[in-house]
Image (spheres, rainbow, N blue to C red):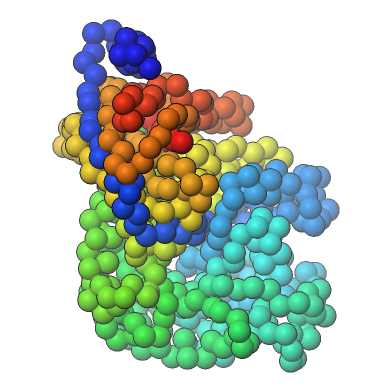
């Protein structure tokens, strides 16, 4: 592309006449491959919370909503298209009160319980172990069960694992009688959830001992692998990480980290859709804290596990705003805007940067709860801007991370300040170079120039996600206000990549 055409594209990306373009420089060391970006980083979390399961996934076989054996067809298809690698279930806080036995056997005979954590509504137990594991199989995702450590004895968790994975014995016979002869694969089991809070309000030292105890009794048949994931810290609780790694590190293979992006306070988190630029910037700054938090937790892990055997699993993350007015506050239903899309892409870039230690992440949550991929209402379904980001980054799954340096202009708004451009780069399983870029500045386009050391490329294609406003979102009436489009603002010149990132945009490029 000639300089004239490049400048023309740049000019067309500027939001207002006369506005100065900003510029950023990247160096991507494509000849120095780094760690694998596990596909599990694109994992999801589905809790018995609000319409996360009932209505969102499960409508039952007799529903008028088109379904396959009780699962919504539209949702199944959308999740398959997304290539969801892993789904964490049944909680969350729900997990440490859940009794798996109440969710197996004939549905009509299952006890109806109260969901004490989420809205005090009845829990019919119609979606239990079989329904979840069959659902994961239909989606093509690996199941990650978070077990009850807070309120059930170790035997209960041990028997749940046996029920799911054993080829023989009474529990296997019971499973067969309930409709599943062959064992399922259960690659991941969680040893409780938020043991420092809703999982039992434990001190770190006690939680470490409890983790050792429960881990001891999880047995799988010879030749079968199960990764045991400990309940890890929240945010900057570095003491929790220290104690767990020091006292129980040999008894687990992964440890969770929960970090939610919260703009205000827990009491007043702000609206998901009605916000000004100051709040927008505050949210993005809050999400960027993930980088430093991971760095410090990873440093503690390195001290006890220099070989990096133990996965850091960010098994709950995402935005948490005030619940949508008019909805049950216990259901955590919120809309997802372009701002959420930028949050998702920024975190994917952060996880890619830390791919040597972060081996799984599960966004909270998959459907109808918090930063959802999908929103449903009766038989209607919205794919959120966050869904589109996950879809755009599909080429990152099991790719190889590439080291990069970036010199970015700053984006400043009120008290918030951050680099305008965030970037990551991978060598995909398809052998191609993929680059993920975010321009958080809502007022300026940014022209980037990227030197591609160790790579010879001839062409570039890509997609962009942006929208008219920072709070643009898809509704049940207007499904495609925010959706990806072909990106024509990039070119290869003398072996380097040039691209003009529109304001407030996510761009994923594909080079060959
Ligand atoms: O995702 C909602 C809740 O947030 C989960 O149940 C809990 O683990 C966390 O505090």
What number of labels is visible? 0
- Image spot of residue 150 (x, y percent): 46, 80
Tell me which corner region of the image, top left, top right, bottom left or bottom right, holds residue 466. Answer: top left
**Looking at the figure, which quarter contains the N terminus?**
top left
Q: Residue at 72% across / 49% down in the picture?
A: 72
Q: Nearer the viewer, residue 387 or 204?
A: 387
Q: Nearer the viewer, residue 493 or 195?
A: 493
130 vs 248: above or below: above
Answer yes or no: is residue 117 visible. Answer: yes
- Image spot of residue 297 (x, y percent): 26, 66
Tell me which corner region of the image, top left, top right, bottom left or bottom right, holds residue 135. Answer: bottom right
Answer yes or no: is residue 267 visible. Answer: no
359 vs 322: above or below: below
- Image spot of residue 445 (x, y percent): 30, 22
- Image spot of residue 412 (x, y percent): 18, 32
From this viewpoint, which residue is outermost toward the left?
Answer: 415
381 vs 330: above or below: above
**Relative horizontal placement of residue 71, taking residue 501 as reference (left or right):** right
Q: Residue at 55% across / 60% down in the picture?
A: 86
Q: Residue at 78% across / 69% down in the picture?
A: 107
Q: Residue at 68% across / 49% down in the picture?
A: 76
């Amino acid at each position: 592309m000639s300089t004239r055409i490049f400048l023309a594209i740049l000019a067309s990306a500027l939001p207002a006449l006369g506005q100065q373009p900003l510029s950023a420089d990247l160096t991507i060391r494509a000849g120095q491959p780094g760690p694998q970006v596990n596909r599990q980083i694109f994992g999801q979390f589905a809790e018995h919370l609000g319409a996360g399961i009932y209505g969102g996934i499960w409508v039952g076989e007799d529903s008028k909503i088109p379904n396959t054996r009780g699962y919504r067809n539209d949702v199944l298809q959308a999740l398959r298209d997304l290539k969801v690698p892993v789904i964490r279930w049944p909680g969350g806080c729900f997990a440490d009160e859940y009794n798996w036995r109440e969710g197996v056997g004939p549905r009509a005979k299952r006890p109806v319980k109260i969901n004490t954590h989420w809205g005090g509504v009845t829990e019919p137990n119609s979606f239990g172990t079989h329904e979840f594991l069959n659902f994961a199989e239909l989606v093509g995702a690996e199941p990650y069960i978070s077990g009850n450590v807070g309120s059930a004895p170790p035997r209960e968790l041990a028997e749940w694992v046996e029920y799911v994975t054993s080829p023989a014995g009474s529990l296997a016979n019971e499973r067969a009688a309930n409709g599943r002869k062959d064992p399922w694969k259960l690659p991941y089991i969680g040893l409780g959830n938020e043991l420092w809070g809703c999982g039992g309000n434990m001190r770190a030292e006690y939680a470490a001992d409890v983790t050792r105890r429960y881990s001891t009794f999880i047995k799988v048949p010879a030749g079968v692998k199960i990764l045991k994931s400990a309940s890890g810290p929240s945010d900057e609780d570095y003491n929790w990480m220290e104690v767990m790694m020091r006292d129980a590190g040999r008894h687990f293979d992964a440890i969770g980290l929960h970090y939610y992006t919260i703009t205000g306070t827990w009491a007043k988190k702000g609206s998901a859709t009605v916000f000004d630029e100051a709040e927008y910037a505050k949210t993005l700054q809050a999400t960027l804290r993930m980088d430093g938090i991971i760095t410090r937790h990873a440093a503690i892990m390195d001290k006890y596990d220099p070989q990096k055997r133990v996965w850091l699993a960010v098994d709950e993350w995402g935005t948490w705003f005030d619940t949508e007015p008019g909805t049950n506050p216990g259901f955590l239903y919120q809309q997802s805007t372009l701002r959420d899309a930028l949050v998702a892409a920024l975190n994917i870039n952060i996880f890619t940067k830390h791919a040597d230690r972060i081996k799984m992440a599960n966004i909270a949550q998959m459907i109808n709860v918090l930063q959802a991929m999908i929103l449903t209402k009766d038989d209607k379904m919205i794919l959120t801007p966050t869904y589109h980001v996950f879809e755009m980054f599909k080429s990152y799954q099991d790719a190889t991370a590439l080291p990069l340096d970036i010199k970015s202009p700053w984006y400043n708004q009120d008290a918030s300040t951050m680099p305008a451009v965030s970037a990551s780069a991978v060598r995909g399983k398809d052998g191609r170079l993929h680059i993920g870029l975010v321009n958080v500045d809502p007022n300026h386009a940014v022209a980037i120039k990227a030197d591609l050391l160790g790579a010879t490329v001839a062409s570039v294609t890509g997609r962009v996600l942006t929208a008219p406003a920072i709070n643009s979102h898809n509704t049940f009436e207007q499904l495609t206000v925010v959706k990806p489009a072909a990106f024509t603002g990039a070119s290869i010149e003398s072996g380097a990549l040039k691209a003009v990132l529109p304001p407030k945009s996510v761009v994923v490029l594909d080079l060959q």
